[in-house]
Image (spheres, rainbow, N blue to C red):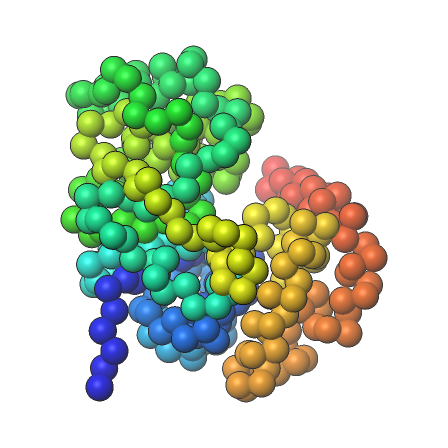
C-alpha cells in the first residue's frame, strides 16, 4: 500500500552543497521520514544526482546558473509544480534531522506559516530599515500595513506553509527580484535592510504585507532542547563535508551517524566520502577546527580573485 504524505520537503544547493543535500535526505530516510523531496540543484554532477535519487522519492529541479543565488530561489521551488502535497516544508541543506520529526513538517492551521521568530532581534530590525521595507512593499504591491505585526523578523532555515499560500510565495519571489541585486550572495552587509537576503525579504512581507499569512504562535521544532529529536542546523562555514569548525563540531555525532547509516546500507563506499566525513580523519580536523573560518575566508578570496 502506498504511503500518503501531507508534506513535501524542499531543499536546494549548488554543487558545493550537494553533500549537504545528500546528508539531509539520508537523515530523513534513516529516521523513517519517507516524505517526497524536491531538490533545487545548480551545477550538480550526474553522479551526485544519482546518489541522492537512490534514497528514493526525490525529484530534481535544475536551477539556471544565470539566475540569483540558490537561497533566493526558495519561493520559486516551494511554489513549483513538483510539489503536490497540501503542505510544503523548506529545510536548509546544511542540516540533518535527528529522530523522526514528521510531526514538525506539517502545520496545524492552513492560514498560518510555521516559522521561528529571530531571537535575539537581528541587526537589520531597526526603525529605519522597517521604514524602507514599508516603502518597498507599498511601491511594488500598492498597499502596506502602517504598524509592524511583529517585534522581530523570522529565521527561514526551516519552515512550513500550506500550498493555499502559493500566491504569497510568488510575491516573495517577486520582492526578492525587486529589492535585491541579481548577483547578491547569501549575506549582504550588516545593517542593510535586506541583511540575510531572502530571509529579510520574507520577514519584511510577514511584518508588513497585508496579504501575508500570520506567523503561528507555536513552532515545535527543537522545542525543549531534546538532542534525540531535532533539526540540527550547521549554519556556519565551512560545512562538515568541507572542514569541521568549532561550531559544527557540536553536531559531529549526529552527522556521522548519518554517514555510518549510508555506509552500512551500501549507499556510499568509505573511499567515496569527503575526507572530513571519514572517521579516521576526525582527530586531525578536530585539532585544526579553530582555523576553519580563516581557511574559508581564504577560499572565498581566491574565488573572487579568479573571477576578476
Q: Residue at 42%, 37% (x, y): give it.
A: 117
Residue 77 drawn at (x, y percent): 31, 53
Give left or right: position of 19 versus 36. right
- Count the labels in the image: 0
Above or below, comparing residue 232 to residue 31 in the picture: above
Quadrant occupied by the N terminus: bottom left
Name the residue nearer the viewer: 139 or 1: 1
Give left or right: position of 167 versus 219. left
Residue 43 drawn at (x, y percent): 46, 59
Q: Residue at 67%, 49% (x, y): give it.
A: 247
Give left or right: position of 217 versus 139. right
Q: Residue at 24%, 27% (x, y): give it.
A: 209
Above or below, comparing residue 176 to residue 251 in the picture: above
Name the residue nearer the viewer: 43 or 171: 171
Residue 165 drawn at (x, y percent): 20, 45
Does the rendering let one see residue 187? yes
Residue 14 drawn at (x, y percent): 48, 56
Does the rendering let one see residue 77? no
User: Which image quadrant for residue 280?
Assistant: bottom right
Quadrant occupied by the C terminus: top right
Find the residue positioned furthest to the front.
224
Name the residue nearer the viewer: 306 or 46: 46
Q: Residue at 63%, 62% (x, y): give it.
A: 241
Give left or right: position of 77 versus 12. left
Amino acid at each position: 500500500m502506498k504511503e500518503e504524505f501531507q508534506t513535501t520537503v524542499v531543499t536546494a544547493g549548488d554543487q558545493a552543497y550537494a553533500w549537504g543535500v545528500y546528508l539531509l535526505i539520508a537523515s530523513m530516510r534513516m529516521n523513517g521520514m519517507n516524505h517526497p523531496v524536491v531538490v533545487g540543484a545548480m551545477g550538480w554532477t550526474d553522479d551526485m544526482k544519482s546518489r541522492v535519487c537512490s534514497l528514493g522519492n526525490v525529484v530534481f529541479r535544475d536551477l539556471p546558473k544565470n539566475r540569483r543565488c540558490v537561497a533566493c530561489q526558495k519561493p520559486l521551488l516551494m511554489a513549483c509544480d513538483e510539489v503536490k502535497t497540501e503542505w510544503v516544508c523548506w529545510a536548509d541543506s546544511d542540516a540533518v534531522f535527528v529522530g523522526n520529526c514528521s510531526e514538525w513538517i506539517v502545520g496545524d492551521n492552513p492560514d498560518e506559516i510555521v516559522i521561528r521568530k529571530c531571537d535575539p532581534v537581528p541587526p537589520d530590525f531597526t526603525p529605519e530599515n522597517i521604514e524602507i521595507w514599508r516603502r518597498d512593499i507599498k511601491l511594488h504591491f500598492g498597499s502596506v500595513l502602517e504598524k509592524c505585526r511583529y517585534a522581530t523578523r523570522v529565521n527561514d532555515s526551516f519552515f512550513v506553509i500550506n500550498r493555499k499560500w502559493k500566491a504569497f510565495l510568488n510575491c516573495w519571489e517577486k520582492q526578492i527580484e525587486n529589492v535585491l541585486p541579481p548577483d547578491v550572495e547569501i549575506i549582504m552587509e550588516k545593517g542593510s535592510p535586506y541583511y540575510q537576503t531572502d530571509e529579510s525579504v520574507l520577514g519584511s512581507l510577514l511584518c508588513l504585507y497585508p496579504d501575508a499569512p500570520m506567523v503561528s504562535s507555536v513552532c515545535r521544532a527543537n522545542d525543549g532542547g531534546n538532542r534525540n529529536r531535532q533539526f540540527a542546523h550547521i549554519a556556519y562555514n565551512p560545512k562538515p563535508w568541507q572542514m569541521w569548525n568549532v561550531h559544527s563540531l557540536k553536531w559531529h555525532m549526529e552527522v556521522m551517524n548519518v554517514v555510518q547509516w549510508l555506509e552500512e546500507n551500501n549507499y556510499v563506499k568509505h573511499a567515496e566520502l569527503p575526507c572530513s566525513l571519514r572517521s579516521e580523519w576526525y582527530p586531525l580536523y578536530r585539532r585544526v577546527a579553530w582555523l576553519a573560518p580563516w581557511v574559508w575566508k581564504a577560499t572565498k578570496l581566491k574565488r573572487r580573485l579568479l573571477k576578476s
